[in-house]
Amino acid sequence: MNNELIIEIDNLTVDYPTENESVRALDGVDLKIYQHDFICVLGPSGCGKSTLLNVIAGFTRPSDGTFLMQGQPVAGPDRQRGVVFQSASLYPWMSVRKNVEFGPKIKGLPAAEINRIASHYLDQVHLLEVADQPPFQLSGGMKQRVALARALANEPAILLLDEPFGALDALTRIHMQQLVRKIWQEDQNTIFMITHDVDEALSLGTRLLVMSKSPGTIIQEFNVAFCDRVDERTGRVHVDADYLARREEILDLIDV
Amino acid sequence: MQNKKDFNKNHRMLTLLTWAFIFLVWFLITRFNLVSHLIVPSPGEVIQTFISIVKDGYNGISLWEHLGISMLRLLIASLLAIVTAVPLGLFSGYFSKVGAVVDSIVQFYRPLPPLAYYVVLILWLGIDESSKITLLYLAAFAPIYIACVSAVSNIRVEYLLSAKSLGASGKDLFFQIVFPACLPDIFTSIRTAVGVAYTTLVSAEMIAATSGLGWMVIDASRYLKSSVIFVGIIIMGISGVLIDQGLKALEKKIVFWKGYQ
């Protein structure tokens, strides 16, 4: 791997304080994320996948260990790490376009530039024609596309997706996966995605991380390239013996 | 859609029938002299009194002046309450230290009967407009303040986290996310607050006033002019409903996303 190192996590531990004792959510996580990685994190529910994402986003402070972004410690959330949640959490008082423009506007870019960026990313997620609508009139998949465009508009160093397609129907999911794959290939983004769907992970990711039950830690990593074998038209992976073997292996690891 | 229309139509019909019934009972009670006219004046008397007050005013002051001065007091007090309670409430909800300072004061005076502190206000501010407006202001302040504090704590966490990840902090976060996210609750509380302020209007106009709807009702009660009392109460009721409808229309326009979060 010759790509630039973006995130370096070493021996990361997170404890959540409860009433009388603290609960360990993450235990000794080591992870290096490089430019243009597409990381998919899999694991049983409650394994700390979301905690790991929250630490990287800057929402949760690590209790122990180091977390460096481009060599610097992270103090809190900032525009370098864009987040898309399972629920789109778009601002209903802003139009679709204003939602996408939010980041660039905060950054203080000139108006023409803000407009150009918003148009570009709305076009990339095929939503230019609904730009002036309020977001609550859109379908679930469209909302998630706006959320994606909003995060992309800041051109973050890494995109964090927390089960972004979890609430969508099967067909919309495949379309969304196709879209994310295309954006990742075109824009050379770095993506860290949490999913509970092994097929989704296999069809998108270049690195699949499998986590154990709590306290969560990464138990195995798979380097895969099934995303190169996706049918352009249907968006589905060509399933072969190799794919099925990987799928079995991962399911065995998760389902203990 | 058609069904919903029919449904609304049915409901409006029910409302109309209810009022027709109330008028009928009122008419019958007075028609057959079931109670003294001094206690319940007949609809005819009330209408006549209304016409004469519209024409000649009450106590030398026209009805519009009575209505106008009451509305002016209500308007000034409500506006003052909005511009102070909204920022203070949002700050209290957002910065717990501000909350620690302001919360207990509001909680202390809120359950007090307005008349109890009105005497103190008169002592401090005198008997003219300022004590009256302050009384209405205090009545309107508490509901807005309390709603703002709770609105901040009910903001969806993802709204704030997304904004921070998009680079927002401090001022931007407060004005572009916290404030609009609380607007639906703010509007509901303004409607409550104006209603509460209106109910204390009579108290405010009871002491040392010479005009205003509340004063008109109090003054009429001293001379047992029950038809004037009825006119006053009906005008207050109708104007109260109209004010609320106006606020509702404003709410629909400004907080167009309400219910769609």
Image: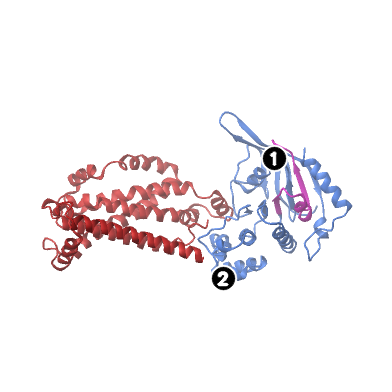
Chain colours: A blue, B red
Q: Which residue is mark 2?
A: A112
Query: What's the chain of the residue with tag 2?
Result: A
Q: CA distance from mark 2 to mark 1?
A: 45 Å
The answer to whether residue B212 is visible is no
User: Residue B138 at x, y = what percent?
Assistant: 29, 48
What residue range appears in magenta? A191-216
| Residue type, label 2 | Ala
Q: B86 and B240: which one is in front?
A: B240
| Residue type, label 1 | Cys
User: Residue B31 at x, y = what percent?
Assistant: 18, 58
Residue A33 is tagged as none
Indicate whether residue A141 is drawn in magenta. Answer: no
Q: How many marks?
A: 2
Q: Is residue B164 left or right of residue A182?
A: left
Q: Which residue is mark 1?
A: A47
The answer to whether residue B237 is visible is yes
